[in-house]
Amino acid sequence: MTTLQALPLPSNFEDLCELFLLYIAYSTLGWCGEMLYCSIPKGHICEKRGFLNGFLCPIYGHGALLVLYLLHGGFQNPVLTFIFGAIVTSILEYFTSWIMEKLFHMRWWDYSHYKFQINGRVCLLNSTCFGLACVLLCHLVQPWLWERIVNLGSTITVPLASFIFGIYLMDTVLSIRSAIQLSAQMGKLRELQSELKDYVAEKREESQERKAERRAEVRAACSTPTPTSASRVKTCSPRSAPA
């Protein structure tokens, strides 16, 4: 197994460009993994995954860098890498879901129908997958990928990172604007739904009141005595007087 490597902190602009390219690489790999994870069970290509419009899932890029820095490149024991990687990525996923819901009043994922989940934000199945991904990340992918990025040299990494950052920044701005607009539309829909519920409840109450009034009228009509037909008076003819 490849020797573990702790990810160094950037000390200059070139190091920062290399780190950004690493972040983009993991965000792209995360997007590809999401597409496969969702498309294979359905048997067809699923809808776009992630917050951005491009082929990126930023949460995977942030998660990969967070794991590499907090775990110092990973533990020699893969089991420890799995456990602590699953914990770190699950915490990141939970608070990312919470923050995005607070900002945009929407959820980008919901695990409420999964077993062993917490508030629909994280679940045991995904945490297990993230733990396994952290083992691959620290023990296999990161040493190989980081070496390839560093070996590109500053003449390639700096302009490449600058170009990709421009596209990434533009995509982020457009995605945030779209999310804000969608949030506003969802707010209007929720208001319309609330008004419709109030209208239906009001009409139901009026209908119940009319039914109650009709029942009261029926009971009143039944309790009022109806006039009986006049009794026939039997008349007797006078007896004839004796002769």
Image (spheres, rainbow, N blue to C red):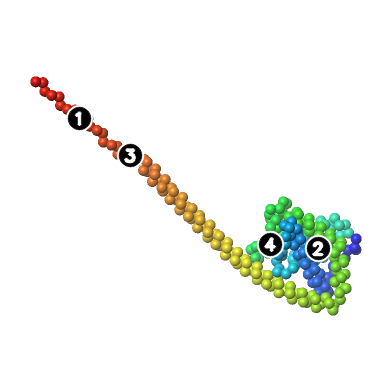
Q: Which residue is mark 3?
A: 225
Q: Earlier in the sequence, mark 2 or mark 3?
A: 2
* Disc 4 crowd, CA 10 A, few/some/many (<14, 14-19, 20+): few
Separation of marks 1 and 2 at Cα, in angstroms: 116 Å
Considering every residue shown, the one lying at the far top of the view is 243
Rendered position, 157 above or below 186: below
Where, by quadrant of the figure, is residue 144 drawn?
A: bottom right
SS for dot 4: loop
Find disc 1 in the rendering and name its residue: 235
Real-space Cα distance between discs 3 and 4?
A: 69 Å
* 231 w.r.t. 11: above or below: above
Residue 225 can be seen, yes or no: yes
Task: Tell me if label 2 and label 3 are in contact, CB under 8 Å.
Answer: no
Number of the front mark, 2 or 3: 3
* Residue 175 on image: x %, y %: 68, 70
Give the image quarter of residue 185. bottom right
Mark 3 or mark 1: which comes first in sequence? 3
Q: Find disc 2 in the rendering and name its residue.
A: 67
Give the number of the disc on residue 41. none
Q: Residue visible at 73% across and 58% down? A: 43
* Residue under pointer 4: 108
Mark 2 → mark 3, Cα distance in angstroms? 88 Å
Gap in angstroms between the C-alphas marked 4 and 2: 22 Å
Q: Quadrant of the C terminus?
A: top left
Which badge, 4 or 2, comes first in the chain's sequence? 2
Secondary structure beneath disc 1?
Answer: loop
Amino acid at circle 4: Trp
Residue under the point 70% across and 66% down = 51
What is the C-alpha distance between the residues marked 3 and 1? 29 Å
